[in-house]
Image: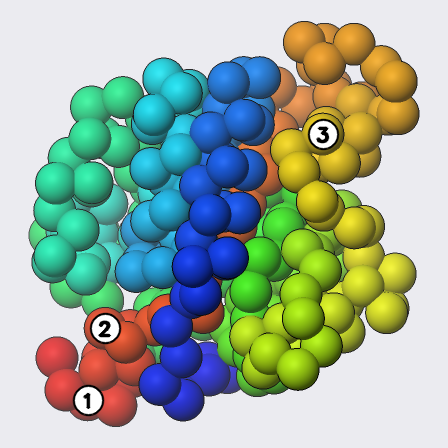
Amino acid sequence: MRSRGSRRASIYGLEVARALGRDLAACGVPVISGLAYGVDSAAHEGALSAGGPTIAVMPGGADVTYPTAKRDLHDRIKAGGLAVAEMPLGMRPFRWSFPARNRIMAALARMTVVVEAAEGSGSLITAGFAGDLGRDVGAVPGQVTNKLAAGPNRLLSEGAAVVRSAADVLDVLYGPGEHRGARPRGDRELVPAETQTVDETHERAVLDGRR
């Protein structure tokens, strides 16, 4: 299920997502997100600004920019990172593409970090997939009176790792006090931290049949 309200990432959420993407990528940790407006794009932008790896999981074909306004960012990711999808090349996203994509992001990511999400957001679905897969889940604390903080704060109450900066993510991936440049525990070479957006205006248009 995807959230249907007119929600947009806050300035706080964008700043945190951009900083997480930048600092994690600078440490060589691939940053996975969905290219959507808001937190997704901010995380990608942060990773690219550090010259580090970032991966966009697309709802349609890997070559199809969605939302179309993010064509430049999509091109930059393809040039310096990676765009992936389970849909064939050239295929536009369908109603079911977005929740289906969530499970791919959760499976690819060693840790899922929710920056902002209202209750019912697709970000929380991704976090649920991550938990079911035995992946780590983290959340950025938010103001209790802000509806965009409801999702992360609930995850924290349920035991998600507190994420205040990239250092907290690295501590989960590597272990507290471990060398930051070492490979995270386990033998996985790809150990991305994935962030999700609460701004799904274009995705909702598809879900509502307004493609």
Q: Which residue is mark 3?
A: 167
Residue at 66 percent of width and 38 percent of height: 165
Circle nearer the viewer, 1 or 2: 2
Based on the displayed image, in which of its 4 quarters is residue 149 positioned? Answer: bottom right
Task: Quarter of the image for the C terminus: give it.
Answer: bottom left
Left or right, 39 with respect to 75, comes to: right
Q: Position of residue 144 (x, y in %)?
A: 71, 77
**Which of pointers 1 and 2 lies earlier in the amino acid sequence?**
2
Q: Position of residue 17 (x, y in %)?
A: 49, 47
* Cα–Cα gap, marks 3 and 2: 32 Å
Residue 202, numbered label: 2
Label 1 sits on residue: 209
The residue nearer to you, when weighing 127 against 84, is: 127
| Point 40% across, 20% down: residue | 50
Image coordinates of residue 87 in percent, x first then y, are 28, 55
Among the two numbered marks 1 and 3 on one chain, the one whose residue lies closer to the N terminus:
3
**CB under 8 Å between callouts 1 and 3?**
no
Which residue is found at the position 43% from the left and 59% from the top?
11
Q: Amino acid at mark 1?
A: Gly
Instruction: Please determine whether, in this image, residue 155 is positioned above or below residue 88.
Output: below
Badge 1: residue crowd in 10 Å (few <14, some 14–19, many ≥20): few
Instruction: Check disc 3 and report its element: helix, strand or loop.
Output: helix
Mark 3 or mark 2: name the one nearer the start of the chain: 3
Eye-nearest disc, 3 or 2: 3
Task: Answer with left or right where residue 31 lies relative to residue 145.
Answer: left
